[in-house]
Amino acid sequence: MTTKHNWTNEEISAIYHQPFLDLVYEAATIHRENKDYAEVQISSLISIKTGGCPEDCAYCPQAARYHTDVDVHAMIKVEEVVAAAQSAKDGGASRLCMGAAWREVRDNRDFDKVIDMVKAVNAMDMEVCCTLGMLTADQAQRLADAGLYAYNHNLDTSEEDYKRIITTRTYDERLKTIENVRKAKLTVCSGGIIGLGETVNDRVAMLRVLANMPKHPESVPINALVPVKGTPLANQPRVPIWDMVRMIATARIVMPKTVVRLSAGRNEMSTLEQALCFMAGANSIFAGDKLLTTPNPDFKDDMAMFELLGLTPRKAFKNGRPQEEKEAMA
């Protein structure tokens, strides 16, 4: 299926609001046009620097201004990252994602350590992803030169809803970071969170921004809010599974070649609910017992689910390394 980059809110809304079974059928049909539709990319997410973040993201337990049970930890050692990567690889993961509770990347010794971590995991023949906050074009290039495969920078919600959730940075700053990632020829991982108290129109508008980028993000995580005591969104109700499936299916239809990741909130889903998400076009998950600071199913349970559903883990670097693509274009 050809990709489109000029979606309107009205077009995406019409897709989202289809009768549920029609929506899932359309998304599943598009997904099955890919001969590897039963392949699922598995990522493992670890926190390399936890807590103490100066941002005010209303959903995040790592913000310094909120009183949560998250303890502040300094940067972990490269050896710990390598051990986590090996454990993840043994469990079936093809990608290790490293997250740091920073507002932005600074050119200091901590960033030097991140570069060493990227090099070490890349040498293990695993895809490496980082989510470190805002970064400049030069910093993105430095990560690319170290062997980074992907950079995650979520939009979270629509531009119109954004200030209700975060006031310490702007939507344009998020888009600028994604632009810097693209300049460095890295793959882009960018999605959002549902269950923040946003409207369906906000969900549609966020998908429109992603789908109208000059190149669709290679990975789009769809997260369900995991409410954490002490954060402003602690009392939000659980996202209905029907909303998750609608978001995944709509993302699959408007970005047919993108990897759509069933992300946070999976720990509260049954195998049957997750099966619906895979049917609707999800072809990536986070595995391992934690997503930074929130619970997540472990590898053993996920492998049992894969066997039951006839899914297989995707191998690393299936589409080549970004650096190779960059050299081919030179």
Image (cartoon, grey):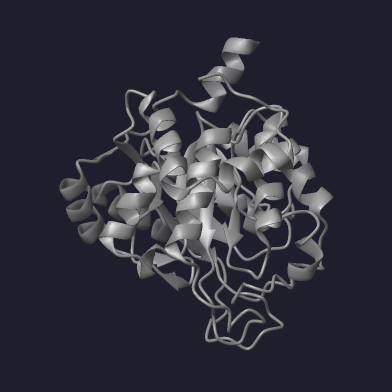
* Percent position of residue 11, x then y: 67, 37
Q: Is residue 323 left or right of residue 283?
A: right
Q: Which one is nearer the viewer's eye here, 173 or 107?
A: 173
Q: How many marks?
A: 0
Give the vertical position of 112 relative to 50 (above or below). above
- Residue 255 appearing in the image: yes
Q: Residue at x 61, y 87 (%)?
A: 230
Q: Which one is nearer the viewer's eye here, 319 or 225?
A: 225
| The C terminus, quarter of image | top right
- Residue 133 appearing in the image: no
* Percent position of residue 132, x then y: 64, 55
* Percent position of residue 191, x then y: 60, 49
Q: Residue at x 36, y 28 (%)?
A: 32
Q: Which one is nearer the viewer's eye here, 11 or 70?
A: 11
* Percent position of residue 181, x then y: 68, 37
The answer to which image quadrant residue 176 occupies is top right
Q: Is residue 185 left or right of residue 150?
A: right
Give the vertical position of 238 relative to 137 (above or below). below
The answer to which image quadrant residue 300 occupies is bottom left
**Residue placed furthest toward the front:** 19
Q: Residue at x 68, y 72 (%)?
A: 53
